[in-house]
Image (cartoon, rainbow, N blue to C red):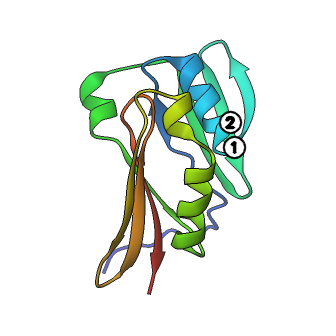
Amino acid sequence: MQNTITMQYKSIRPFIGARDFDVSRKFYSALGFEEKELGSDMSLFTFGALSFYLQKAYVKDWVDNTMVFVEVDDVEKYWEKLNSLHLLHQFTSVRLTPIRYEAWGKECFVHDPSGILWHFGEFN
């Protein structure tokens, strides 16, 4: 039998990299995240209870293999919102992938300006 940790976790904040820090900052602000600058090479982005650190650091293998899953209440509404932001016109390297329906639920995808893959999903 393994010991368990008996404390409460308050949040989880992944660190993600950026090929072009300023472009990525604008992208996440366009998605609705609020930015708090923590220095010239790092910002904290927050949306409600969700947060992550954006770093002015780019390691291709790291960024190319970074994925973040965000659970949303309604994928269809979220997909409509994503499309209404016209991200593809503002950010040339951003990609959007429409909703996929799976046995566990459904999700749509966004590749940020650096190539980080964001999954926005809804469980059954």
* Rendered position, 23 above or below 107: above
The residue pinned by badge 1 equals: 33
Q: Residue 20 has which mark?
A: none
Which residue corresponds to the image point at 62% horizontal and 27% vertical from the top-left? 25
* Label 1 neighbour load within 10 Å: few <14, some 14-19, many 20+: some
> Which of the 4 quarters of the picture holds residue 85?
top right
Query: Can residue 6 be seen here?
Result: no
Query: Can residue 75 be seen here?
Result: yes
The residue pinned by badge 2 equals: 29
Which residue corresponds to the image point at 34% horizontal and 75% vertical from the top-left? 2
Q: Position of residue 110 (x, y in %)?
A: 43, 48
Inspect the image, locate mark 2, and give the three-letter code of the amino acid beneath it.
Ser
Which residue corresponds to the image point at 52% horizontal and 70% vertical from the top-left? 75
- Quarter of the image for the C terminus: give it: bottom left
* Rendered position, 43 above or below 41: below
Inspect the image, locate mark 1, and give the three-letter code of the amino acid beneath it.
Phe
